[in-house]
Image (cartoon, rainbow, N blue to C red):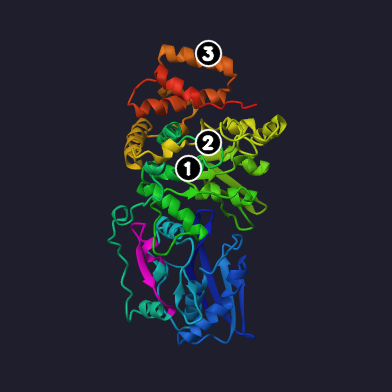
Amino acid sequence: MLAKVKSAAVVGLEGAVVEVEVDLSPGLPSFTIVGLPDKAVQEARERVRSAIRNSYYKFPNRRITVNLAPADLKKEGPAYDLPMAIGILISSGQLNADLSNSIFLGELSLDGKLRHTHGVLPMVALARDKGLSTIFVPLDDAKEASLIDNIHIFPTESLAQLVVHLQGEVGIPEYHSELNWEQEFRPSYAFDLIYIKGQEHAKRALEIAAAGRHNILMCGPPGSGKTMLARALPSILPQLTMEEAIEVTKIYSVSGLLPQDTPIVVERPFRSPHYTISHAGLVGGGQWPRPGEISLGHHGVLFLDEFPEFGHVTLESLRQPIEDRTITVSRAHGSVTFPASFMLVAAMNPCPCGYYGDPFKECKCSSGEISRYHKRISGPLLDRIDIFVDVPHIDYEKLTEDKPGESSDKVRARVKAAHEIQLARFRGTKLRCNADMTPKEVKEFCTVEPAAQSLLRAAMKQLHLTGRAFHRILKLSRTIADLEHSDIIKTHHMAEALQYRHKEII
C-alpha cells in the first residue's frame, strides 16, 4: 500500500514542500530512503523503527521504500522522521486518516517523543502560503510556529499522542498564542552610552550612523573605547518592528541559533566575528549553504574589530552586500540568496603598534609599516563607508568626572524621530533609511541650499572624491538634516558630513 504525507524542507531561508511517499511491498525486510537524503535523513531508519516499536505499534517486517519528492531537491536534517513514521503506519494499515491538508515536522527520539527542529518558522510560513491548513510540530516549537497567522498549529509531544489524535480518539488541543510579543519580550541592553566617559565626537558620529543606518569606521589607540562604543550602538537603534523581528527570527531558526525559551528575536543582532574567520563563515556557505555572519547581522550591526587584520578576500566580500543588502552563495548544485541589510561598524588602530599620533606613547612603526597596514583595506571598500571618526586617548579627568553623559534612551528617541521621517519619505517604496537611497532618490530628496552646494563642489575638487563618495556625502547630510527636522540640507549639515570623510594618515 502506498501512503503520501507532506513535510517541508528549507532552501536558503524559504521553505519547499516535500512529499514523503512510503511504499510497502513483499520481499526481504529492508528500509530504503531515496530522494537525495543526507546522512541525518538516512539515519532516520533506526530512529523511526525504534520510535514505532516503543510507541507500541508494529513495525512492518516487509520491504519499505521511502521517496522524498521532489527527488532533485537535497534533503537534510531529522525533520522528516515524523512524516516517515506516519507514512509507515498508514501503509501498514495501523492508521487511517485524511492528511491532504496537513504537514508534519519533527525529529523522533527512540522512545517516540518529538524533539526540537531547526527552521520551523520558514516551514510554517510555507505551509500557510501553499494553502495547507494544519501543521503538526514538536511541542518545543509551538511558540515559534505561532508567529505565523492563519494556520492551525498542533503541538505534539510524541508519535503515540499524534496517532491517537489522527484516529479521532483523544484530540491534541490547538495552540493559540495569547502573548503580545512586543510586550512580553523587551530588549535588554548590556551597554549604555551613559557609562562611556568622554568621546562626545564619537558618540555624535554613532548617533548619525544609527539615524540613517550608515557604515562607520572608528580609528584610535588601544583602550580608547572603540569596542565599548560599538557594543553600545544597538542601544540607540530603534526597536525591531514585528516584520523585521520575523525576518531575523527566520535566519536564526534556520541557523539553529534561536533559543527555545525565546521564540522570537527582539533585539537587533550584534555580530562580532574574530578576524580569523573564514570567507564562508562571514558570507555563508558550506555544502548545504547556511547564513554567515553577514546575514546573522541582518537588521542589526556587524562589528569587525581589528579591521585591517581580516583576510583580503574576506574584506572584499563585503562590498557587494553593502550595496545590494543581499548576499548570494553559489555552489555547484545551485545558488541561495540570503538577506544582508546590516550596519557595518569597523574599528582599527592607527598603526600596527597602535600608538601613531598618541600624545603619551611613542609609535615604534616605520612609515612603510603604517602605509602597508592601511593599504590592507582597499579604496573601493573605504568608499563604501560613510563615517570615519577618530577615537583618541581618554584623559584621567574625563574618566573620573561625576557629570553623567547622555543616556542611550535619550539618543534613541532622537534616532527614532529621524527614522520615522525617513519611513514617511520612502513610503510606498522598498527603501527604509537614507543609506538605502539610490542616485534617483538622492536627486529627489536631497535638496541642498546654494551655499552648501558650493561647499560640496569645493570639497569634490580638493579631495578628489568619487561619484560614490559624492552620493554618500549627500545621504549623510540628509541624515544630519533629519536629526534637526530640516527639510533642506544646509551648510552646517554639509560641513559636518564632510568632516567624517576618510583622511589619509601617510
Which of these two is toward me, 492 or 389?
389
Q: What residue type is labelled 3?
A: Ala
First of labels 3, 1 by sequence position: 1
Check residue 147 for magenta coloring. yes
* Tag 3–tag 2 contact (CB < 8 Å): no
Identify the residue shown where x is 62% and y is 69%: 39
Residue type indicated by callout 1: Ala
Q: Can residue 116 be seen in this view?
A: yes
Label 1 Cα crowd, 10 Å radius (few <14 / some 14-19 / many 20+): many
What type is the residue that disc 2 sits on?
A: Met
Left or right position of 350 against 477: right
Picture coordinates of residue 360, whole percent (x, y): 56, 34
Q: Nearer the viewer, residue 123 or 66?
A: 123
* In the depicted structure, whether residue 277 falls above or below residue 77: above
How packed is label 3: few (under 14 Cα within 10 Å), some, or many (20 or more)?
Answer: few
Q: Nearer the viewer, mark 3 or mark 2?
A: 2
Quadrant of the snapshot with the C terminus: top right
Report the magenta residues as a range: 141-159
- Residue 325 place in picture, x, y as percent: 51, 40
Determine which residue is flagged by label 3: 458
The circle on residue 218 is 2
Could you tell me residue 130's position as x and y percent? 43, 57
Task: State which tag comes first along the sequence, 3 or 2.
Answer: 2
Asked if the residue at tag 1 contacts the one at tag 2, i.e. Cβ–Cβ closer than 8 Å, the answer is yes
Magenta segment: does it hold 255?
A: no
Disc number placed over residue 363 in the picture, else none: none
Nearest-to-viewer mark from 3 and 1:
1
Secondary structure of the residue carrying numbered label 1? helix
Asked whether the residues under the numbered discs 3 and 1 touch, taking CB atoms below 8 Å apart as contact, a structural biologist would say no
